[in-house]
Image (cartoon, rainbow, N blue to C red):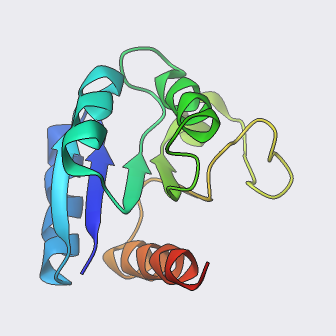
């Protein structure tokens, strides 16, 4: 199946998503922040990135996504899975906030296993058809 990189500073969330995605046959690697993400991308060349926002700084995920979409990884789908809306009260929509959210898809935590799988499969299918 696909190689997926999960980037989140919460080890329990990474583990839960990893178990769900591995049960679907995906190869999963993990990173706990922006720096380890950069290294993991270089080493594992993922097909899809699952990215949190609030890690080392409250906007680390936003900054990392800007960096990635402007560089050599601009075609890699990014699924932002975050609790930033709950923490800040801001509600984001990738279609309406495209300039602010340089990601392929966005969902607030907690995300159900079924929704995670559905979103991941949809993004991977779109990538294959491009």
Look at 13% across and 81% down and name the residue there: 23
Single out the residue that lies furthest toward the front: 72
* 121 to 99, vertically: above or below: below
* Left or right for 98, reference 126: right
Question: Number of callouts in the render?
Answer: 0
- Indicate the position of residue 71 as horizontal and vertical percent values: 56, 34
The picture places residue 48, in percent across and down from the top left corner, at: 40, 60
Q: Position of residue 63 (x, y in %)?
A: 56, 24
Residue at figure coordinates x 51%, y 50% from the top left: 80
Furthest-top residue in this view: 57
Q: Percent x, y for residue 121?
A: 43, 81
Location of residue 4 with respect to 90 vertically, above or below? below
Q: Nearer the viewer, residue 113 or 65?
A: 65
- Which residue is pictured at 30% across the width and 33% down the height? 37
Extreme right residue here?
96
Question: Horizontal placement of 103 versus 120: left or right?
Answer: right
Residue at x 37% of width, y 63% of height? 47
Q: Looking at the picture, does residue 28 appear above or below residue 24?
A: above
Q: Is the C terminus in the top left, top right, bottom left or bottom right quadrant?
A: bottom right
| Residue nearer the viewer, 12 or 18 | 18
- The quadrant of the image that shows the N terminus is bottom left
């Amino acid at each position: 199946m696909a190689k997926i990189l999960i980037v989140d500073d919460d080890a329990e969330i990474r583990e839960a998503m990893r178990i769900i995605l591995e049960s679907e046959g995906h190869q999963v690697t993990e990173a706990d922040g922006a720096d380890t993400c950069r290294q993991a991308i270089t080493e594992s060349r993922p097909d899809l990135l699952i990215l949190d926002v609030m890690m080392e700084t409250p906007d680390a995920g936003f900054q990392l996504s800007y960096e990635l979409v402007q560089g050599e990884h601009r075609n890699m789908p990014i699924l932002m899975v975050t609790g930033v809306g709950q923490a800040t009260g801001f509600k984001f929509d990738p279609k309406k906030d495209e300039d602010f959210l340089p990601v392929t898809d966005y969902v607030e935590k907690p995300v159900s296993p079924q929704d995670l799988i559905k979103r991941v499969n949809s993004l991977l299918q779109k990538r294959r058809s491009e």
